[in-house]
Amino acid sequence: MLSAHPQVRDAVVIGLPDDDLGCRVHAVIEATGDSPGEDGLRSHCAEKLAWYKVPRSFEFVAALSRNEAGTSRRSALIPNTDS
């Protein structure tokens, strides 16, 4: 869905821990050049998704790493909160 945006080269959506919700939708974005911005991505998603599926937060990275099979390791994208 996010990859359909003209300024998004690649995207991965993960769940991050949230004190209030238990888990919140977070998108990691590799832009094509000019960043589409959070507001642009949020409105793009809101046109096609139910409100609770729209990412609450976005993170922009230079490149998303994928393995030989073309899949990303979502667990590697979740920050370690263990102390």
Image: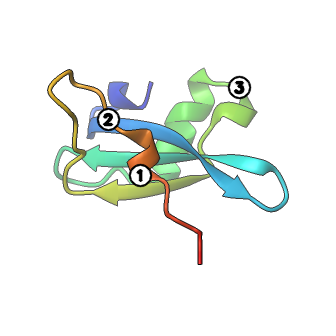
| Mark 2 crowd level (few <14, some 14–19, many ≥20, 10 Å Cα) | some
Q: Quadrant of the N terminus?
A: top left
Count of numbered badges drawn on the protein: 3
Please report contact status of discs 1 and 2: CB closer than 8 Å, yes or no.
yes
Q: Identify whether 7 is placed above or below 83.
A: above
Report the residue marked by disc 3: 50
Q: Which of label 1 and label 3 is nearer to you?
A: 1
Q: Position of residue 42 (x, y in %)?
A: 55, 44
Return the residue found at the far bottom. Answer: 83
Helix, strand or loop at mark 1: helix
Question: On the picture, is 72 further left or further right than 23?
Answer: left
Q: Which of label 2 and label 3 is nearer to you?
A: 2
Depth check, front residue: 27 or 7: 27
Sequence-earlier tag: 2 or 3: 3
Kind of residue at badge 1: Leu
Question: What residue appears at the point 32 percent right and 35 percent down from the top-left corner?
Answer: 72
**CA gap, disc 1 and disc 3:** 24 Å
| Mark 3 crowd level (few <14, some 14–19, many ≥20, 10 Å Cα) | few
Report the residue marked by disc 2: 72
Kind of residue at badge 3: Ala
Helix, strand or loop at mark 2: loop
Q: Identify whether 23 is placed above or below 80.
A: above
Question: What residue appears at the point 79 percent right and 50 percent down from the top-left corner?
Answer: 22
Q: Quadrant of the C terminus?
A: bottom right
Label annotation for residue 77? 1
**CA gap, disc 2 and disc 3:** 24 Å
